[in-house]
Image: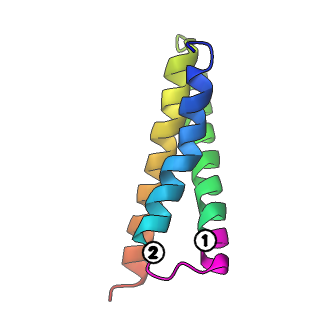
Amino acid sequence: MDDYLPSWITLAGFIVPAVILILKENTRDLATISYLLVIAGLCMLGGLLFSALLIYLIPTITHPLLSATLVLVGALLGLSLRTACQRLLNPD
């Protein structure tokens, strides 16, 4: 199980934002859920880029568990950035 743990944590970089986005949405039709899953995928992509940047800047990060955790943290940062931008653009 220890061999797959970084993969599961990286996958959580997609699942956690997707669940958060779907639970926060009031209308749950197919188009909205599809849109939110695309947004969750973009959050995971942001998490991958965040992890790659930190691994590039700090070359001592070599443990797979740490890099997978950075992907999850980056995905949650991307989700919080999306939420902050959405609140700034829609002040109601």
Q: Marks 2 and 1, how far apart in space?
A: 9 Å
Question: Residue at position x 60%, y 81% from top?
Answer: 29
Residue 77 versus residue 38: which sits nearer the camera?
A: 38
- Left or right relative to 88: residue 15: right
Q: Amino acid at mark 1?
A: Ile
**Residue 43 horizontal/vertical position (percent):** 57, 53
Judged by its main secondary structure, the magenta piece is: helix
42 up-or-down from 69: above or below: below
Which is more toward the observer, 8 or 80? 8
> Which residue is labeled 2 in the image?
25
Q: Is residue 11 above or below residue 77?
A: above
Quadrant housing the N terminus = top right
Residue where numbered disc 1 is placed: 33
Q: Are marks 2 and 1 in contact (CB under 8 Å)?
A: yes
Q: Secondary structure at mark 2?
A: loop
Residue 22 in view here: yes
- Give, as a single range, the part of the protein colored magenta: 26-35
Q: Residue 92 in the image: state x and y as whole percent.
A: 32, 89
